[in-house]
Image (cartoon, grey):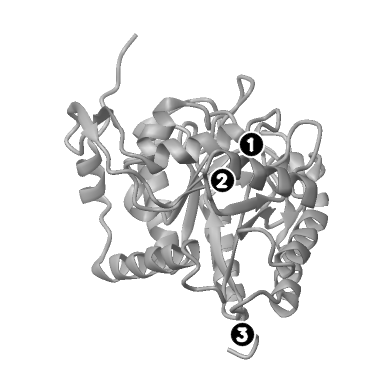
Amino acid sequence: MKQNSFPTYNDLKQKLALKDADLKFLDNVKSFCKNIFYKKNLNKLIVFAGPCSIHSEKEALLYAEKLKNLQKELKNIFLIMRVFYEKPRSENSWKGFLYDPTLDNSLSIETGLIKTRKLLLDITHMRVPIATEIVDPNVFNYFEDLISWGFIGARTSASPIHRHFSSSLKIPIGFKNALDGDVDIAINGAYTSKNRQSFISIDDDGKIYQKRSSGNELSHIVLRGSKTSINYDEKSLDNANESMKGKNRNFPIIIDCSHGNSRYTYQNQIKAFEYTLRLIEKEKYPIIGVMLESNLKEGNQSLNPLNLRFGKSITDPCIDFEKTKDLILKADKMIKIPGFHLNQ
């Protein structure tokens, strides 16, 4: 079978390079995220919103534009767009825009790399911060300069490769609990990432080498529920806090309102989001952010390239943007936690 050689990280980054103004914007966003992580900027709650997965540049850019306009109306919430170009799969199905950008199973990964970097650049030009899930660390290195927040999914939180790789990054990285609800896997993942590691990696010029990381102080955990139950409720958060205390750990928490926390019914994200806001008001838990799976239109559709409806997910079902907007605007007005100043 013929093998395709890809451009090196440096090659693609130079071909599709950031402008100085973009670099300044990203530096500011990453500094802002770090302050929220360390609770130096307590008057902002992060909401990660965006499609379960992207499959269309046009749709992703339209969503980014709407998110940018929504941010202008907010005082207490900082928006970061979910731009998930890879999809972890439990079964053999579509793996994401990067792997199959034309949606026809032609699997032109090199085309996917180019299209993905260009899309991330375009969203950055719009001044919209980006978060993504790191499915393949080798892929992430093509885009690491464009990402302000990263996540390690439920299927890979226990992976030594992902834990070690995360330890070398300088942005917040959230480890999700396992599919069966095991939060200790996320806690152990964040702890491993926080510490120095030595592992095999690929440098910007495509050479394999031994990398020594200094540890990622911005590691944290994400509660996303399980196949059978939610874990954004007080009892689950108490248990998570106890687990961290028992391991002498203390990580910030992000609540993923989808997946198990929505009981795999996308409309239930609203219930999880509103409940989490009430918990934040109690000042009991170290919650710094909330995640929503949201698209231009609600629900989802089967992957049929000849009959795709505009703005609708081809993976997990999402709430539509109008519901997302209403939910976030209401939250921005109602939320009251230490440091929030509603008259800013």
Q: Mark 3 highlights which residue?
A: 341
- Report the side of 150 relative to 55 (left or right): left
Residue at left 82%, top 43%?
265
The three-letter amino acid code for the residue at tag 3 is His
Q: Earlier in the sequence, mark 1 or mark 2?
A: 1
| Whether label 3 touches label 2, CB < 8 Å | no
Quadrant placement of the C terminus: bottom right
The three-letter amino acid code for the residue at tag 2 is Ile
Task: Please identify the residue farthest to the bottom as the structure is shown.
Answer: 343
Tell me the distance, in whole angstroms, between the alpha carbons under discs 3 and 2: 27 Å
Residue 261: image location, x then y, percent: 76, 44
Mark number, residue 221: 2
On screen, 113 above or below 339?
Answer: above
Mark number, residue 183: 1
Question: Could you say whether the residue bearing mark 1 is in a helix, strand or loop?
Answer: helix
Classify 10 Å Cα crowding around label 1: few (below 14), some (14-19), many (20 and above): many
Residue 23: image location, x then y, percent: 29, 65
- Report the side of 180 relative to 195 (left or right): right
- Report the side of 176 relative to 238 (left or right): left
